[in-house]
Image (cartoon, rainbow, N blue to C red):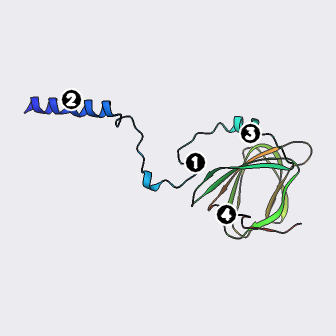
Amino acid sequence: MRTILIIGSIFIAFFFLTTGKALAPPIAQHLIDAKPPEALLFDVEKWFQDRPIEKPPLRAETVFLSPRAQVIFIRGKGNLLGRHIHSQVDELVYIYKGRGEMYINGKWVPVKAGQFHTAPRGVAHSTRTTGDEEISLICFFTDPLPQPLGDRVMIDD
């Protein structure tokens, strides 16, 4: 009996090692509906360095999109976007680099790298820089922004 267990174990190990199944990452392919469809690890500093602002006042790129969430990296200078609300999604913003001001609860508040801001659906918010410094943001949306124009309702022109 012991010999059978040893031979069986060797056969199973040989099978998994030769087919590659032992080394393949576990994936539930039928559940994948995100873009990109694989797990990624970002070097955020390099990402922002490699993507200068081409059309001021900002550069924004979606780096992750699924039916449940959206992540956008934003690099900007000046008034990035006028005061606005979102009618369908919550927006969560991590200030990755730089400093500026955010419109929070009816007033402009100084912000700097390392801070995190939450803007629930329906609450007015905005971001701007002061002086010549750029700001880099990582924005998380609790659902993807509706396309093609998003759910933004502008307060300022």
User: In this picture, is 88 found above or below 2?
Assistant: below
Which picture quadrant has residue 3?
A: top left
Disc 2/disc 1 C-alpha distance (Å): 38 Å
Tell me if 51 is positioned left or right of 8 in this view.
right
Q: Is residue 11 left or right of residue 154?
A: left
* Element on which disc 2 rests: helix
Around disc 1, counting alpha carbons within 10 Å, would you say few (fewer than 14), some (14 to 19), or many (20 or more)? Answer: few
Label at residue 36: 1
Label 4 sits on residue: 90
The mark tally for this picture is 4
Q: How far apart are the two marked residues, 2 and 3, measured between alpha carbons? A: 50 Å
Q: Nearer the viewer, mark 2 or mark 4?
A: 2
Q: Which residue is mark 2?
A: 10
Q: Indicate the amino acid at tag 2.
A: Ile
Earlier sequence position, callout 2 versus callout 4? 2
- Which mark is in front, 1 or 4? 1
Q: Residues within 10 Å of mark 4 (few under 14, many from 20)?
A: some
Amino acid found under the numbered disc labelled 1: Pro
Question: Which mark, residue 48?
Answer: 3
Could you tell me how far apart the alpha carbons at marks 1 and 4 are, in whole angstroms?
Answer: 22 Å
Q: Secondary structure at mark 1?
A: loop
Labels 1 & 3 near each other (Cβ < 8 A): no
Q: CA distance from mark 1 to mark 3?
A: 19 Å
Query: What kind of residue is marked 3?
Result: Phe
- Give the quadrant of residue 113: top right
Circle 2 residues within 10 Å: few <14, some 14–19, many ≥20 = few
In this orientation, does residue 137 appear?
yes
Is residue 102 in view? no
How crowded pointer 3 is (Cα within 10 Å; few <14, some 14-19, many 20+) is rated as some
